[in-house]
Amino acid sequence: MDLSIAVLLAQDGITNGAIYALLALALVLVFTVTRVVWIPAGEFVAWGTLTLAGLQMGRAPGTVRVLIGMAVIAGLMETWVCVRRGETRRLPRRLFAWTGVPIIVAALVAWLAPMQLPFPVQVLLTLAAVTTLGPLLYRVAYQPLADASVLVLLIVSVALHFTMLGLGLWFFGAEGSRTPAFSSGSFEIGGVNISVQSLLVVASSLALIGALALFFGRTLFGKALRATAVNRAGARLVGVSPDFAGALTFTLAALLCAFSGVLIGPITTIYYDSGFLIGLKGFVGAIIGGLSSYPIAAAGALLVGLIESFSSFWASAFKEVIVFTLIIPVLLWRSLTTTHHEEDE
Amino acid sequence: MRMHWSRAAFAALVVALALVPLFAPEFWVTLGNYIGLYSIVALGLVLLTGVAGQTSFGQAAFVGLGAYTTAYLTTKFGTSPWLALAVGMAITATVALFLGFITLRMKGHYLPLATIAWGMSLFYVFGNLDILGGHTGMSGIPALSIFGYELKSEHRYYYLIWAIALASLWATNNLLDSRPGRAIRALKGRLEMAEAFGVDAARLKSVTFVYAALLACISGWLYAHLQRFVNPTPFGVPMGIEYLFMAVVGGAGSVWGAVLGATVITLLKQVLQDLLPWLFGRSGNFELIVFGVLMVLILQFAREGLWPWIERLMPRRKPRPVAVAEPLPARDHARHAGPLLEMKKARKQFGGLIAVNDLSFEIRSGEILGLIGPNGAGKSTTFSLISGAAALTSGDVTFRGESIGGAPPYEIARRGIGRTFQHVKLIPQMTVLDNVALGAYLRGTTGIVRAALALDGVEEARTRAEAARAIERVGLGDHTFDAAGSLPLGKQRIVEIARALAADPLLLLLDEPAAGLRFLEKQELARLLRSLKVDGMTVLLVEHDMDFVMGLTDRLVVMDFGEKLAEGQPTEIQKNEKVLEAYLGGVI
């Protein structure tokens, strides 16, 4: 291997790593606030790419139908809860939030899809559709089990991964899609060719990470989420609704994943089942950060991207083995530095 | 004697299973084979997930290890399949021990995540290694033969699979109802308690994980010689997840849940594969959608799975009576010359906060010593320093003249210190008898293998008799077979004392035993403690309730702000000005 190949691999690794970092942040966010190990994050990435690909072809993507279906279920669940608790006065507002808004988003996407609007608009529509799915998923699947153990929530996550995989095949089909790059240009610095697309990916990842830091450090919502992450009961006592915190977390996390999907689309061909592997790579990063530290998780994800890119050069058949085996020394190190074990429930 | 209904049901099941290959069509035999293979794997998950509170998505990878080991050894070297089974089990145990070692000391979700990663890696290894046939797999695996009798047809193989499945069921059931079984049940959310009675929790978790992995390996070995062909597909993470579904859907709390879950999922998959493409008009992975939704619904509405629903329809099982048996070996209760326990300038600091500040006092044999003080005085921390739940910053604790400062709870229990918990830590679904028997954990020696093979009869009878005696001693004989969680708080506290007594302790540590009790319950508790003292027991009582302590203890140690404020007989303490000031803020 000479230097130019190394630079090329490093560029690839950093680009992919930046995308995994977004995912790793979403996973840490979801875990700290809701204790959910969010396996279906990868499906959100794949759906992001596939939704955008559908819009490119002027078709209303399958995401629209899932949105409508979930909105109806969430509406029914809200109605049931309100009626049972005798809080019918709250019902119209809740129905608007849980059923009305998602259906409006779905209708908007379905209506605008055939118009083949400019690329940035399509990206916005994609983000809107996939992001709306996040809180709906929380409301329908996780919220009724919010007090369950981490283990139960993890099993729910795996079940949802299965469901979304099946729905993905049904709605998007088995063929893979690529989406166009934001820019096909490239430039040279000191004899090294750098693509504008890579630069855009890294820059937008950094921008999102910065925005998240601002959100958590400076806004009331962000602080409320942090409070819930530390102590659910305590947060409830000071007026932060854990249900609201959960929905908000899933909105943010879905946005991060959808954005990752838009970024990864031009780099790799995405199939309905590509999400799981991508998600697991984000997980390896998140686990390096102990599912709690944002900066270490992001750095870990970057490392995963680099290792993946270099191992695909040396031992491409064992690329995945190497990436997933990386988790073993990480766990070993964490285990040896953890001095006490904690009660599991 | 009339046969017990559960035995009768079991016999009926065995007969029905035996008849399937004789009368049912080929297709059913095939299904039966698969249900048997899956049940073996799901059984391991019942123990691991339902009972011990850990989980694994990587069981399919262990199945793969069993299958590939025998496939490789028998086709390349002509090794005997039985030897290949032993090799496969050795490899599996090694991998499981290693994975357990790196994950089980941490929070519960690291093991499942590690098993996903391990399942993914192994799948790619199987698929990419040319010597293992890559993605096309390996064929030409020989058929099994037993004493020269070849098991070539599916019909004959069926009997082997189900013999092993039923044997695993029997062994796992034995295991759950034994000394290690009681400890495994305590792993789920009662770790601190288990360790206080001498259970080495980290080791036991690893052993449970290895047990589940070995069952999966055996299933894989059977699979390889049934199919006589292996490829990577059935050993990937999706199948690992399906195994977990089987255990959860069937009911991970019971061994029968494993068989029920394996049956339901296998049949459901069969039906869905036929029905769904017909419903939706084209082929796809619709069963994935249904499986996923079903799973979420089951967790939302029937978290314990399907088996408890069936169990509720059946008549309640009568408890096995406690037989008369020799007592377990007991400790030397001869009085120790000098103080039984001594705190020597014990200190505990949390960062800048000094919770216990160079505290010294002693507990003399045969007395009831009260440790009291206002909220935040450091009583509970002192208690933790003695019981080993917290580490000393400096100073020492000696018991019978030997240092126990810094020893783990396991070691402290072994030396003869029994304890109760401020927040009752019983296993609510287990009977009072089983809960108390857990207290005698260190007085027995039965390990996993002896327990699984039901070779622990004598020791088990002695343990049960010992537990029953402790229950009688505290006056709860009428509740021996009740579920511990069904008793009122006052009685649960007393069950905790019985459990501590079953350990045959020299010193009893009681952490706020009167908290939350009603007046009559307190009186009953006081009566019990007095009678224990008459029998020669030494007691350290950490309490809040002044009235309760005053009439009961021989001496009192009063703490405030981590330091000893006063020490003496209750009547002296009542007049001590410093104590009055600490308690009443100097108003008087």
Image (tube, helix red, strand yellow):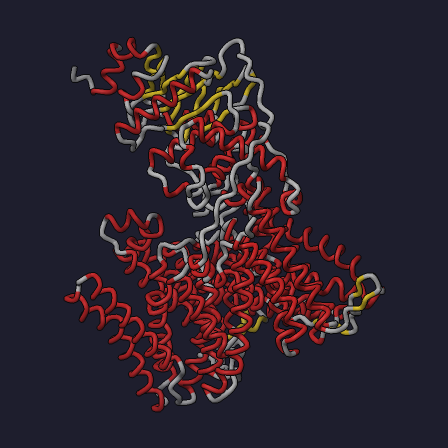
Residue drawn 36% across and 34% down?
B491
Can residue B361 be seen here? no
Q: Position of residue B446 (x, y in %)?
A: 63, 38
**Camera-nearest residue between B196 and B328:** B328
* Image vertical order of residue B46 relative to residue A247, above or below: above
Residue at 71% x, 76% y: name it: B136
In this rendering, position of residue A143 left or right of residue B189: left
Q: Is residue B348 left or right of residue B30?
A: left
Q: Which residue is painted at 54% across and 35% down in the image?
A: B464
Residue A45 location in percent, x, y?
A: 45, 72
Observer-nearest residue: A45 or B252?
B252
Compared with B272, B423 (above or below) is above
Q: Is residue A305 left or right of residue A294?
A: right
Q: Which residue occupies the extreme left position in the image?
A: A89
Q: Is residue B448 left or right of residue B50?
A: right
Q: Number of callouts in the render?
A: 0
Please determine whether, in this image, residue B281 is positioned above or below residue B572: below
**Quarter where residue B358 is shown:** top left
Report which quarter residue B157 is drawn in.
bottom right
**Can residue B274 be seen at all in this image of the molecule?**
yes
Residue B478 in the image: x percent, y percent? Answer: 40, 35
Q: Residue at x 55, y 51 (%)?
A: B2
User: Which of the two residues, B140 or A295, is positioned nearer the viewer here?
Assistant: B140
Measured from the top left, where is residue B448 in percent x and y?
A: 63, 44
- Choose top left, top right, bottom left or bottom right for residue A27: bottom left
Q: Is residue B180 above or below residue B69?
A: above
Q: Look at the image and tell me in which quarter the C terminus of chain B lies.
A: top left
